[in-house]
């Protein structure tokens, strides 16, 4: 008669190993999906508007921001860029949308985003002077006397930029 052993065979060890790895993988996927679901319900629109205002010192209004589950595709729609103080007209530009397709892992690896595609659809761009002769675009984008930054100093990378401009006044 054959004697039964109390230990797992070679096949049994692999079976337990793969089941354990599968459970761990599914748990990680569920945690990631839960995290992204929570992130999508945050007031992302308000955070982005405040961040832009802090970076360039100008008021921006965004109607809608949406993204894919893994945040690889982000769309902002109905963006109004307001003129800086000292200009009579309220609107500097209106953008129908901005689409960003990027690699979130590049933030971990390179500490800067790699944007595969950035598509911007500008409906209106109003370039005007105020009473003091200052141009609104120059007031939000200071001209630097430095050479352009090298790739290693750039805060992000663009692979493709698609720009559509309907009307410039």
Image (cartoon, helix red, strand yellow):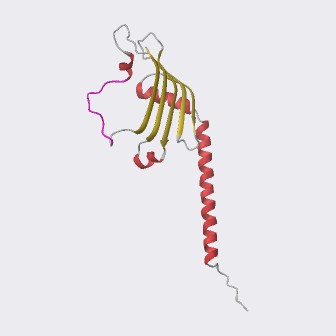
Residue shown at the point (44%, 22%) measured from the top left = 58
Residue shown at the point (41%, 45%) measured from the top left = 111
Task: Choose between 117 and 46: the one closer to the eye.
Answer: 117
User: Where is residue 87 drawn, in percent x and y?
Assistant: 42, 12
Quarter of the image where one finds residue 136: top left
Q: How many numbered callouts?
A: 0
Q: Seen in the image, is 3 located left or right of residue 121?
A: right
Q: Is residue 141 above or below residue 69?
A: above
Residue shown at the point (61%, 66%) measured from the top left = 18
Q: Quadrant of the N terminus?
A: bottom right
Quarter of the image where one finds residue 169: top left
In the picture as drawn, the residue positioned furthest to the bottom comes out as 1
**Magenta extent:** 141-151
Residue 144 belongs to the span the image colors magenta: yes
Residue shown at the point (26%, 27%) measured from the top left = 145
Q: Seen in the image, is 55 located left or right of residue 41?
A: left
User: Where is residue 49 drawn, in percent x and y?
Assistant: 50, 27
Task: Choose between 102 and 22: the one closer to the eye.
Answer: 102
Quarter of the image where one finds residue 76: top right
Task: Choose between 7 and 97: the one closer to the eye.
Answer: 97
User: Where is residue 81 drawn, in percent x and y?
Assistant: 47, 21
In the picture as drawn, the residue positioned furthest to the top comes out as 131
Q: Is residue 19 above or below residue 58?
A: below
User: Where is residue 138 drawn, in percent x and y?
Assistant: 35, 19
Residue 139 belongs to the span the image colors magenta: no
Most common SS among magenta residues: loop
């Amino acid at each position: 008669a054959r004697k039964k052993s109390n230990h797992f065979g070679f096949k049994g060890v692999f079976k337990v190993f793969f089941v354990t790895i599968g459970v761990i993988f599914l748990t990680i996927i569920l945690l990631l999906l839960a995290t992204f679901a929570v992130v999508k319900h945050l007031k992302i629109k308000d955070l982005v508007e405040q961040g832009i205002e802090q970076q360039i010192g100008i008021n921006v209004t965004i109607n809608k921001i949406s993204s894919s589950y893994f945040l690889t595709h982000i769309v902002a729609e109905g963006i109004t860029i307001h003129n800086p103080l000292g200009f009579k007209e309220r609107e500097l530009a209106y953008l129908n949308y901005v689409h960003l397709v990027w690699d979130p892992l590049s933030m971990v690896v390179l500490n800067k985003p790699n944007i595969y595609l950035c598509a911007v659809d500008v409906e209106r761009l109003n370039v005007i002077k105020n009473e003091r002769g200052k141009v609104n675009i120059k007031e939000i984008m200071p001209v630097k006397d430095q050479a352009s930054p090298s790739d290693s100093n750039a805060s992000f990378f663009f692979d493709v930029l698609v720009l559509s401009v309907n009307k410039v006044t």
